[in-house]
Image: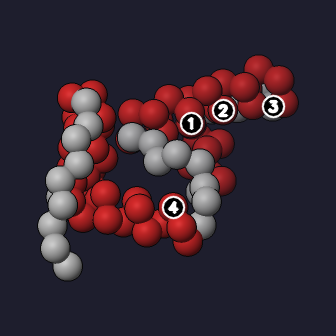
Amino acid sequence: MADSTITVGQAVRDRLATLAAQRGTTIRDLVDKLASEAFDEPTQPRLTRQELDARHAAVTAHIAEHLVPGFDSADVAAGE
């Protein structure tokens, strides 16, 4: 397969670098995987580890506030 170049803004490039590093891969391989997955299974956008952690914290807080008073990380660990 011949190589091609795409131009993206610095913020996108930095995000791709972060996502690739967290997955132990290169930007090239990450973009290839993201592009192929986009056609295989439409899902929500890929999230960085920090975004996943923030989402997890928000969900845990919501559960503790609205569903299970006192719910905490020990409950999460027990559920895993």
Q: Are marks 1 and 2 in contact (CB under 8 Å)?
A: yes
Q: Nearer the viewer, mark 4 or mark 1?
A: 4
Q: Amino acid at mark 2?
A: Val
Q: Nearer the viewer, mark 1 or mark 3?
A: 1
Q: Nearer the viewer, mark 4 or mark 2?
A: 4
Alpha carbon distance from label 1 to label 3: 16 Å
Disc on the earlier residue, 4 or 1: 4
| Picture quarter with the N terminus | bottom left
Relative to 77, residue 53 above or below = above
Q: Are marks 2 and 3 in contact (CB under 8 Å)?
A: no
Q: Which residue is mark 1?
A: 56
Q: Which residue is mark 4?
A: 38
Relative to 10, residue 42 above or below = below
Q: Between residue 6 and residue 22, name the one nearer to us.
A: 6
10 Å crowding of disc 1: few (<14), some (14-19), many (20+): few
Disc on the earlier residue, 4 or 2: 4
Alpha carbon distance from label 4 to label 1: 24 Å
Alpha carbon distance from label 4 to label 2: 26 Å
* The furthest residue to the right: 67
Q: Which residue is mark 2?
A: 59
Alpha carbon distance from label 4 to label 3: 37 Å
Q: Which quadrant holds residue 40?
A: bottom right
10 Å crowding of disc 3: few (<14), some (14-19), many (20+): few
Task: Give how far across and how far down residue 70 sits, in percent.
Answer: 72, 26
